[in-house]
Image (cartoon, rainbow, N blue to C red):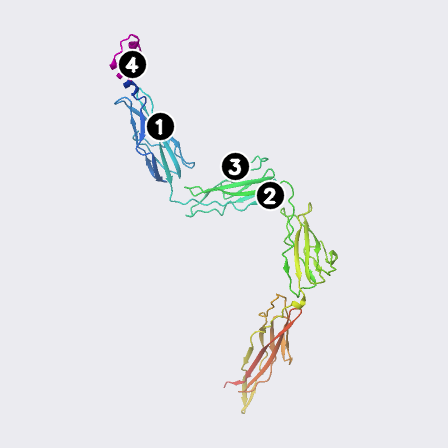
Amino acid sequence: MMRLSSTLLLLAAAGCIQESDTDIVEQDKNTCEQPTASLTEESLTASVGDRITLQGNGEPCTEDAALTPTWTVENVPVESDVDAGSLNIDDVWQPYFECDAVGTYVVSLAVAEDGGGSSLPVYAVIDCSSDNDAPVADCGDNQSAKVGDRVDLDGSASRDPEGAELSYEWALASVPACSGLDAADVYNGSTALASVVPDCDGTYLASLVVSDGENWSEPSQCAITVAADNQPPIADAGDSEVLSPCTNEQYQLDGWGSYDPEGEELSFYWTVISTPMGSAADNTAFNDQSAANPYFQWDVVGDYTFQLQVNDGDQWGAPDVVTYTFVDVTENERPLANAGDDQTITNEPDCETASYVFTCEDCPSDSVTVDASASTDDDGDELEFYWTEATGELTIAAPFSPTTELTAGAFAAEYNTAITKTWTVDLAVNDCADTNTDQVTITYTCTGQYTP
């Protein structure tokens, strides 16, 4: 083309150019400068394991000129092993490969003309999916630690919907600016149970992904909050509540819910914040202000507010406050006694005869169990029980227990005659202010029997 243009310039300079020469110049402008490449399909979809076959085409600038195709693997999913060497080329215009991971593959085609130029590349985009659901990673709970402590990471709650065996990959998604740790510092990072040792204070973000052999999960991330210094202890003075009218005047507080993040032993300190009008109670009403659960002597009904602070041997934690409302005993609800069902005893002792005179064994001593545990109190008071029997003929094993054994003594039997004894047993139930009663009847029937 350059030679033709030079000739035209020379002819023009010599004044020899004719009208037909202009046509030649126009024809030269329309001549192609490079071959073109094309693909039968530029967008494909497939499933993992499918064979992908590409169909390339080329158009030379010079008629019948030979073309040479060049295929290039431009992009594959992270989990794929496909590369330029993975293209199988039995036919240079129809290479193929196997889709081995979920994601997008991009393959380009360019053609070169013998003795001429090369085409611009064209691209085939293959989206590869899977019927297999991705597994779910679970890195466990957020944790707290101190610098230099080993933090154990537990991903064993990760799961696969199809139940496939999982592989694990732990990493540190982020670390404090002062830290020099990276993914290589996660010990046993390819197992369900990994660990890391923080090197400075701050927040570390541990990340876990799991694979079922085909798909990778979305990452699961857990925070590790690391303190260089001792963390303050946590005071817990218990829950505020309205107490029963039967609450003892020596009421026991409860600070056992307090704890130290590092597990250090705690010391306790209780103080009175407020008392009802007319109360003379102050800090001297504690039997021991430094106990975890001291007794407090309250004196008038109303609201008492207490504060608890705890110390781990190095520092005091933030105080916790609790309020108890002590109620006037006149507001007490009477308990309901329930002595249970009536009880019966039946016996048939043996009798002997001589000259038509019958002699029988005694009706034996026998026992029943009575149960008053169905007794109730609307205030939720602790109940006291007391069983009695007026005649004294029954022995009560545990008269102050809700459940007890009653024993009737032996007595004489008569041949073929039913002797029946009946006792009424009284139950009294007390909640500290009021008493309620109930009764249960014990019936003992004894008949002597003669067997020839």
- Distance (Cα) linking label 2 and label 4: 82 Å
Q: Earlier in the sequence, mark 2 or mark 4?
A: 4
Q: Is residue 279 left or right of residue 404?
A: right
Residue indicated by mark 2: 145
Instruction: Tell me which amino acid carries mark 2.
Output: Ala
Instruction: Tell me which amino acid carries mark 4.
Output: Leu
* Magenta region includes residue 224: no
Residue located farthest toward the bottom when viewing the structure as drawn = 355
Residue 286 is situated, as x and y percent measured from the top left of the image, at 72, 57
- Distance (Cα) linking label 3 and label 1: 39 Å
Q: Earlier in the sequence, mark 3 or mark 2?
A: 2
The boundaries of the magenta stretch are 1-25
Secondary element type, mark 1: loop
The answer to whether residue 331 is above or below residue 319 is below
Q: Which quadrant does the N terminus fall into?
A: top left
Mark 2, Cα crowd under 10 Å, few <14 / some 14-19 / many 20+, is many
Residue indicated by mark 3: 183
Secondary element type, mark 4: helix
Residue 59 is situated, as x and y percent measured from the top left of the image, at 29, 26
- Distance (Cα) linking label 2 and label 1: 55 Å
- Distance (Cα) linking label 3 and label 2: 19 Å
Instruction: Tell me which amino acid carries mark 1.
Output: Pro
Residue indicated by mark 4: 4
